[in-house]
Amino acid sequence: MINLIYTILPAVCLITGFYFGFKIGKTLELPSIPEKVKHPIKTIIEEKEQKEAESELNKAIKNLNNFDGTAESQEDI
């Protein structure tokens, strides 16, 4: 008799655990991973390219502000 209980009880507990775990898990959403953590190398390369483009644009704006009709006050881009 006790062997029958030891055989059936773990199966019942396992089934109820799966059932309630699935029921609770359906209502909760998984947290999303930020893009920086998901693709670290890709984001580092994109940030580097963005900084280079930003510095190039800053040089162009500085050249426009310093323009006096000659090339002496201009920086190479």
Image (cartoon, rainbow, N blue to C red):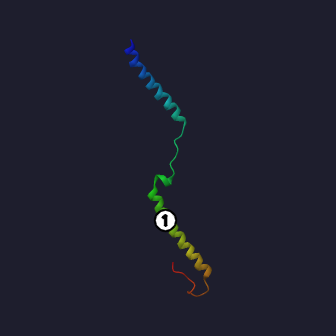
Q: Which residue is mark 1?
A: 48
Q: Residue furthest front?
A: 2
Placement of the N terminus among the 4 image quadrants: top left
Q: Is residue 61 above or below residue 5?
A: below
Taking the image as shown, residue 4 lies to the left or right of residue 71, namely: left
Q: Is residue 41 above or below residue 30?
A: below
Q: Please report the residue visible at 54 percent of the width from the left and 69 percent of the height from the top.
A: 54
Q: Please report the residue visible at 47 percent of the width from the left and 61 percent of the height from the top.
A: 44
**Amino acid on which the number 1 mark rests in the picture:** Lys
Q: Residue furthest top?
A: 1
Callout 1 environment at 10 Å: few (<14), some (14 to 19), or many (20+)?
Answer: few
In percent of width and height, residue 66 lies at 61, 81
Q: Please report the residue visible at 52 percent of the width from the left and 44 percent of the height from the top.
A: 31
Q: State the SS at label 1.
A: helix
In percent of width and height, residue 24 lies at 53, 32
Q: Please report the residue visible at 54 percent of the width from the left and 71 percent of the height from the top.
A: 55
In percent of width and height, residue 9 lies at 43, 20
